[in-house]
Image: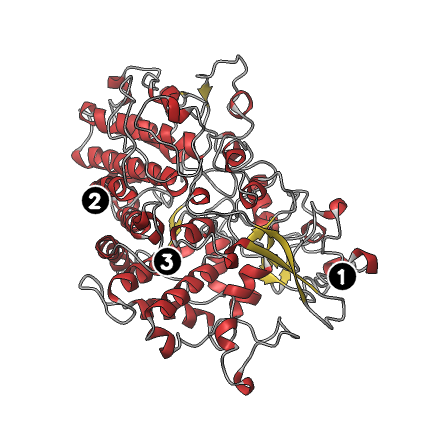
Amino acid sequence: MKSYKIKILIILGLVLSFSCEDYLDVAPESVLEKEDVFSTFKNAQGFVEEMYALVVSYEQQGHTFQDFLLGDDGFVDRPTKASGDIDAGRFFSVIGDSFVYLNNHGGPNTAYGDNDGDRRANVTLTNAFNRQRPGLYDASLYGIRKANLAIANVDLMVNATQAEKDVILGQAYFFRAFFHNEIMKFWGRYPYIDRVLIDDFKLPRPETYKEVALMANEDYKKAIDLLPVDWDNEPYGQLTRGENKGRLTKGTAYAFQGKNLLLAASPLMKGNNVSIDTYDYDTELCDMAVEAFSGILKLADQGRYALATTLDELDEVFWKSPAPNAWPGGTEFIFAATGGSRVQAQRFMTSGVSTRIHTTGAGFEVISPTHNFIHNNFGMANGLSIEDDQKLPAAQRLFDDTKPFENRDPRFYKWHIIDGQIIDPGAEDPDFVSAQLWYVSPAQNGQGKHRSSGAENLKILSNTGYMWTKFYPKVDGKYHTRWNPIINQFIGVRMHMRLTDVYLMYAEALHASKGATTAPASYSLTAEAAINLFRDRAGIPNVDPNIVADNNRFMDELRRERAVELSYEAHRWVDIRRWGLAHLDKYKRKLALDFPEDRSNFTETLLVERICEFPKHYWLPFPQGQTLIYEGFPQNPGW
């Protein structure tokens, strides 16, 4: 997306602390009079552009290594990383960790070039380094304030057309809702700031998540009315025609409207931290979410979006950019953070693969996919989970625990490197020919060259017996290696929203409200049919009729399908919390799969048992000082 470069708007007066009070009493950000800022559409859009730059890139916001898989799906052998703090239940350490996307990189004096010690120093939102932008909490508050400034001053656009005013307003309403949602996903119910605040910042914390979500919903509805279907088709989009892929549209607003409502309808939010039943949704909110998702699915039917139809086509969604520095995402793209650098992108793209294989010097620790996540979610070629496959008569079962890598769902092979898999058959060095992920105890002196055997190797090798490759380039059957250096041709991007996610959320909301086989009035697709779209794409059978007939089993299957399709895209920690599952043993135990070189036996090894209590570890805490600023802003439960 091309930026509107307006000198008068590149500088922001931002507060660098976590405190709500410190942020909300800041004077308006512009260094010019507001009449100048909103004098023309180009100037006003320049102001809005900085809201795009405040959207946090989860995969590039960290440091030299992206610790962004915070659920049961990834393991980093560094307990002091954010995921290690989450595993240990040290959530105050998480909110103090400047090397995770939730917070600012390097603290206030290093993150934003504040060399004179002024906590209200100017900030440059550079496209080159996402990690030098504010973290999620601060960025969201800054974004909310900017949105409110745009809404409050849009009438000053006396030299703009009505369409130009509408699109400025549409973007501002969207971002006001979106940035509230970003905070709510991790901290829960939060005051909805719907006006420019100077000194009246003492806003009470709402009693329920639903209350805030409904306020955000009103903003999303306004955004839908005001935003275009395609910027390229509008007069104001001609300045950047062909480069508008990342800009907000009606489809983007429909998708996030639905997500906001589904999250509010989910078991955790409905229980309001008092009780939790993983199958109990707010069906009224689910119906509203289905209606919103139907809006973007109708646009897809009209050709605006389209699902990738084969697993190979998904490469264009994740990493196979159509041209140098162009956005991937293909026809599934809906919304992602802007900017970044090639180095940061490559650190993300290689984060699941041993440094001995990619040898780019672009990463340090590896995020190893956990055996428990793979075993529980990536099922068999017959379309069943491993658990359901084992309930079949012995002669019909596909899973054999002495041959756990055989007969699996094609997506298991698509998005992982497993022991013995060919990496580059033409490489002269055996380290690059095939994956060596076997492991026995150090006393037996046995481990493959791509498998960690202790502290000296934890920064470069797998810890679990698998590597994940969803964003890792592979051309003509060969992965990127020193022998096949192709990574510079591509840019991998983790999207905040893509079309697959929309179909999965639509199916979840619809099933929670009306069951698996009933279509809503707003759209013709049932939840069962929506899930089978992805099974057809993967080449596995449709959902078993016995599962479809059982509401709870079908919800479990729907969630498993979501885990597979959105694997390693940083949705998992939010999902297992909103479903009310994160405190159960199945989701707390992170496992590795150990086996000797000849694969004569396989052993599940416990790497860590996560500390997770309900409701304490379902929400991040606010810094203790923030809850003491004024009455009416209580701490999250348990903290």
* Mark 1 vs 3: CB contact within 8 A: no
User: Residue 607 placed where, x, y %?
Assistant: 64, 53
Say which of 601 and 56 sits in front.
601
Select label 2 or label 1 by which is in front: 1
The secondary element bearing badge 1 is classed as loop
| Vertical placement of residue 464 versus 126, above or below | below
Say which of 430 and 575 sits in front.
575
Quarter of the figure with residue 373: bottom right
Say which of 216 and 20 sits in front.
20
Name the N-terminal-most of marks 2 and 3. 2
Q: Name the quadrant of the C terminus.
A: top left
* Dot label at residue 278: 3
Instruction: Check disc 3 and give the amino acid type.
Output: Thr
Instruction: Check disc 1 and give the amino acid type.
Output: Val
User: Residue 239 placed where, x, y %?
Assistant: 32, 36
* Residue 415 visible (yes or no): no
Q: Which residue was labeled with disc 1? A: 440
Q: Residue at x 40, y 23 (%)?
A: 10
Q: Which residue was labeled with disc 2? A: 221
Instruction: Check disc 2 and give the amino acid type.
Output: Lys
The secondary element bearing badge 3 is classed as loop
How busy is the neighbourhood of tag 3: few (under 14 within 10 Å), some, or many (20 plus)? Answer: some
How busy is the neighbourhood of tag 1: few (under 14 within 10 Å), some, or many (20 plus)? Answer: some
* Residue 399 visible (yes or no): yes
Name the N-terminal-most of marks 2 and 1. 2
* Mark 2 vs 3: CB contact within 8 A: no
| Side of 411 relative to 160 (left or right) | right
